Image (cartoon, rainbow, N blue to C red):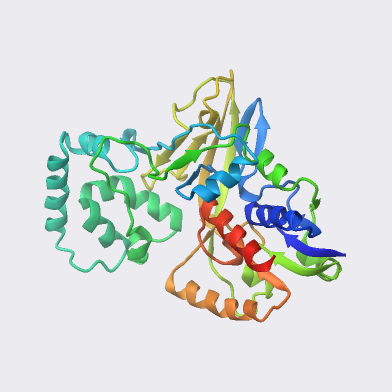
Amino acid sequence: MYDYLIVGAGLFGAVFAHEAKKKGKKCLVVDKRPHIGGNIYTENVEGIAVHRYGAHIFHTSNKEVWDYVQQFAEFNRYTNSPVANFHGEIYSMPFNMYTFNKMWGVVTPEEAKSKIDEQVKASKINNPENLEEQAISLVGKDIYEKLVKGYTEKQWGRKATELPAFIIKRLPVRFTYDNNYFNDTYQGIPIGGYTGMVGKMLEGIDVQLGVDFFKNREELQVQAQKTVFTGMIDEYFDYSLGELEYRGLKFETELLDEKNYQGNAVVNYTDYETPYTRIIEHKHFEFGTQPKTVITREYPQKWVRGEEPYYPMNDDKNNSLYERYRELANRETDVIFGGRLGQYKYYDMDDVIEAALNCAKEHL
């Protein structure tokens, strides 16, 4: 018998299992994938830590969370500074003075603000009703057309005029020459990748990989007093109220016989015609000097049942459906729902850890 069956060997499940073990609880962690780590899994290819499910840069201003992860890994000083490629034109991200200088030739913050204000005023948008109007009202038409529109429509699979305005309300705009994408106090990547970090969290805990919870549900749940479920909440209830919507991703990864493919870890392709949203060159996350390099092209796609979901579609319709599922979840006295899929919420890694720690405090 186990105290907890934990479904999912990702970050939420691993943190909860670690905290439970510290309290003397016995846990069984199962995952349908053949590896631990969930979407932050990294694997070694030619000495390069490859982020198998897309780029993951750890950042937080929560000192408790930062101190927590230091137990399990040494972090490097990587700073996320992606660049945008629009038909061969290269722009700095997030939108900052380097971006504005390249776009308009302006040099001072006052000149940049004046240019944006001029375009916002010309748009005559007073109450933005969709993502397109919201973006133009924040950064003007030039930046929207080149750096927001195509990327966003590829990412979400919908026209920008059909997307809710709230998705882009916090679009970062900086009037400084600073390419640091995140403003958080702490930032970096575990040296050697995330898999080792999660492995340390799970030390001394029973882990079974390649196990599909839904195919072995009764057999697994009978072994534990409680279940921590980090999968899709609608799947747990057999989609009884309908399907929640997600966005899927497809990854094409190549090992190249060259030292440096694109000169940066992340390059976003912001035109609509390029089918992928970004190319990741993994060695640059750890300042690699290996003779070869590994790149990954990331293609957003429509999610269909049976495939891996990546992003919840948190519009009004889906959030309303999730609330109905949450009511069902609250009636499950022996099941705890957590993580991005279990709570149908876009979480950064530090948010996942904080949520898992809070969940552990509540239940342990």
- Quadrant in the picture for the N terminus: bottom right
Q: Residue at x 60, y 34 (%)?
A: 74
Q: Residue at x 24, y 55 (%)?
A: 138
Residue 210 on image: x %, y %: 79, 52
Quick one: 21 or 328, which is closer to the camera? 21
Q: Residue at x 48, y 50 (%)?
A: 62
| Horizontal side, residue 28 vs residue 257: left or right | right
Visible residue check, residue 53: no
Quick one: 4 or 90, which is closer to the camera? 4
Q: Residue furthest front?
A: 23
The vertical placement of 219 against 324, above or below, is above
Residue 201 on image: x %, y %: 70, 47
The vertical placement of 77 against 54, above or below, is above
Quick one: 87 or 57, which is closer to the camera? 57
- Quadrant in the picture for the C terminus: bottom right
Residue 40 on image: x %, y %: 61, 46
How many numbered circles are shown? Answer: 0
Visible residue check, residue 251: yes
Residue 121 on image: x %, y %: 12, 57
| Horizontal side, residue 160 vs residue 239: left or right | left
